[in-house]
Image (cartoon, rainbow, N blue to C red):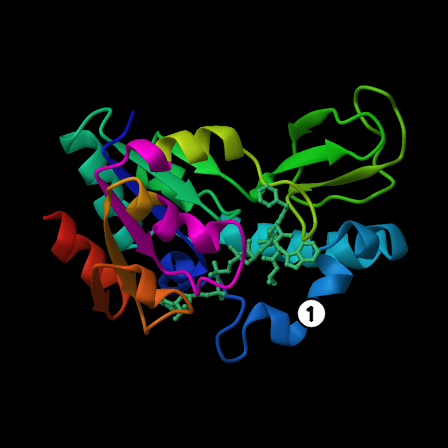
Amino acid sequence: MASIVILTGAGISAESGLGTFRDKDGLWTKYELKKVATPEGFARNPRLVHEFYNARRKNAVEASPNAAHEALARLEREMPGETLIITQNVDDLHERAGSKAVWHMHGQLAGALCAACDHRWTAPLVMSHTDPCPSCGAPSTRPDIVWFGEMPYHMEDIWVALSEAALFVSIGTSGTVYPAATFAQDAAQAGAETLEMNLEPSDVSRDFDMARFGPASELVPQWVD
Ligand code: BV8
């Protein structure tokens, strides 16, 4: 299991041009969270939800990994088998920077999910809820994204990874969304050292032994190299 477990949030992709959620003019200031990031919102207006994720999928495809993503990929190459990225992000910038050990606990823009039969497949760039499921044919296609009130992916493995980490590093997250917001505490209780790297103090800064504040594209390469 990895000795260094790294949690990333929207802040690591901010300098790649992908919007964060809760910063000034963040995503939640333009779209109402409960209308586009909950199962109820999808049931009520699937067209609006697909419009939201189609726009983000387009932005993500057009964006490039930044120096922070690239530094984490270097760290993985330098310490094979010793690092794990648990990301709340749904973009694929970690993978495009070269990281291999990446778990997307909130799903991925690149994934499509059938709301009727749970079939998963690779999402086209533009999706619509009327797209028939390739497996059961039902017109119930949704993004393979974990919405509020839904169970995040990889939770069993995440609890194990946190219990075995020597170092837990959090990069670019406001610490407002659970269960990710408790990961620093969970790792510390199991004996890990904890480091927060963020533009500014987060809601959970008190849970960290060490902290560095500034842009991820500067802090992460300094920490890795
Ligand atoms: C769950 C979808 C049970 C993907 C997201 C009532 C009913 C049901 C649940 C709840 C409830 N009340 C509370 C809950 C729990 C709920 C929750 O946490 N609500 C919050 C609002 C209180 N959580 C859930 O529902 C989760 N499921 O609890 O199931 C369970 C529990 C335990 C174990 C198993 C099961 C599901 C949560 C997932 C929701 N999906 N989005 C998408 O559309 O992208 S969450 C959304 O917020 C994104 O995924 C995002 O990743 C996540 C966290 O946001 P951040 O990444 O932190 O981004 P943010 O903008 O907030 O912060 C950016 C940070 O970066 C800032 O601090 C900024 O300073 C910094 N920054 C900016 N620029 C830079 C930078 N840092 C460095 N460099 C820079 N350049």
Q: Is residue 107 left or right of residue 140?
A: left
The residue indicated by pointer 1 is: 31
Q: Residue at x 45, y 62 (%)?
A: 175
Residue 169 in the magenta stretch? The answer is yes
Q: Is residue 13 left or right of residue 123?
A: left
The image shows residue 121, relative to residue 93, as above or below, that is above
Residue labelled 1 has its Cβ within 8 Å of some atom of ligand 1: no
Residue 7 at x, y percent in the picture: 37, 48
Q: Residue at x 64, y 44 (%)?
A: 145
- Image: 145 above or below 38: above
What stretch of residues is rendered in magenta? 162-186
Residue 102 x/y as whole percent: 40, 35
Q: Position of residue 48 (x, y in %)?
A: 79, 59
Q: Which residue: 65% across, 74% down?
A: 30
Amino acid found under the numbered disc labelled 1 = Tyr
State which quarter of the image contains the N terminus: top left
Q: Secondary structure at mark 1?
A: loop
Image height check: is 215 above or below 189? below
> Which quadrant holds residue 113?
top right
| Residue 1 left/right relative to 106 | left
| The furthest residue to the left | 225
Q: Residue furthest bottom?
A: 24
Q: Is residue 81 visible?
A: yes
Q: Residue at x 42, y 69 (%)?
A: 203
